[in-house]
Image: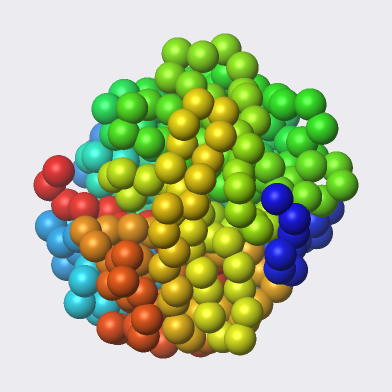
Amino acid sequence: MKNGHWALGVSAIAIVLAGCGGAMGPSAASSFISEASSSQSHGFAWNEPARDKSLLYVSSVYSCDVYVFTYPRGKLVQTLNVCGLGFGPAFGLCSDQGGDVFMTMGEGFSIFKFAHGGTQPIAQLENESLLPVGCSVDPKTQDLGVASAEGNVAIFKNGSGSPQIYYLRDVAGFFFCTFDGHGNLFADGERSDRTFTLTELPKGGSALREITVSANVGPGFALQWDGRYVAIGATQASNKFILDRIRLRGSAAKVVGTTTLDAAPNTSIPFQFWLQNGVVIQPESGNAEIGFWNYPKGGEAIKDIPIGGSSLVGVTVSVAGR
């Protein structure tokens, strides 16, 4: 489990998350949420052209923007400046079965929840023990899992309320997480010596456990359940990005296949990928575009969406009418 590529340290990720946000602070965000809840009761603020379409959300950590495109067409329908909420920027993104979108924020220990196509947040989840990076929603229970750079993992039951927080000795920070099809949560991160770690919170379990991975994987990249295996970002080199598909047996994991993406990011910023109906979606070209590849085939991108800049990180697809 050596670090086979560049990895962003915990202190550096904290700077990225907390150093780019807005300046309004917690009280401003709390006020905003109150106003949003009030406006929802009088008629929720929707982006009408996007309301009944599947949507692709993409976050940018340096511009504070979250871009919203129709999916799979890729037409830009709105841009959310989330630093205007008082926290920011948005980093990791995930969505639930109802199409609601969760955004982990770089300040205020917070995660914002947006309805599908919504222009204002409908809920704010927070805990002072968290520096949230990645998130995932259990499709069966709607529990929200959050990976935190503070070295812990949080579970918000039904995606609301106060979380249950879990730690594992010698883990300096967690980056991304994913639920599998059985309600088990997997989170990747780094130990205090900056080597990769993969952990599991079994469904109904009370403690994290470490998974031994027989692969050359380094910390800082995302992971996601593909319906059969956990797909995890493994290496980045020569303008290519490799996803390992790993099979889990007890406390050990074995690589059973790889997917090589051409023209993937050449960047020092950690980033997400998202799997949607046989397509992998993630930033590419120095995090200035969003690319689409066949999964698990990989190879050349089948579609690109130029956005500009160099700071695209989070990505999720919100499906309408599920």
The quarter of the image holding the C terminus is top left
Up-down relation of residue 141 to residue 51 (above or below): above
Quarter where residue 206 is shown: top right
Q: Position of residue 195 (x, y in %)?
A: 78, 50
Residue 193 seen from this side: yes
Position of 187 compared to 321: left or right?
right
Q: Is residue 82 left or right of residue 211?
A: left
- Taking the spot 56% from the left edge, 85% from the top edge, the residue there is 239
**Residue 6 x, y percent position in the rendering:** 74, 68
The location of residue 7, given as percent across then percent down, is: 74, 62
Q: Residue furthest right?
A: 193
Location of residue 13 in the rendering, given as x and y in whole percent from the top left corner: 74, 56
What residue is rendered at 45% in x and 74% in y? 260
Residue at left offset 37%, top offset 68%: 281
Q: What colour-coding does the image apply?
A: rainbow
Could you tell me which residue is drawn at 37 percent across and 36 percent down?
A: 180
Up-down relation of residue 301 to residue 42 (above or below): below
Along the line of sight, which residue is nearer the eye, 106 or 164?
Answer: 164
Q: Is residue 311 above or below residue 249?
A: below
Residue 25 visible in image: no
Between 30 and 270, the residue placed more toward the observer is 270
Count numbered badges in the picture.
Answer: 0
Who is closer to the viewer here, 94 or 279? Answer: 279
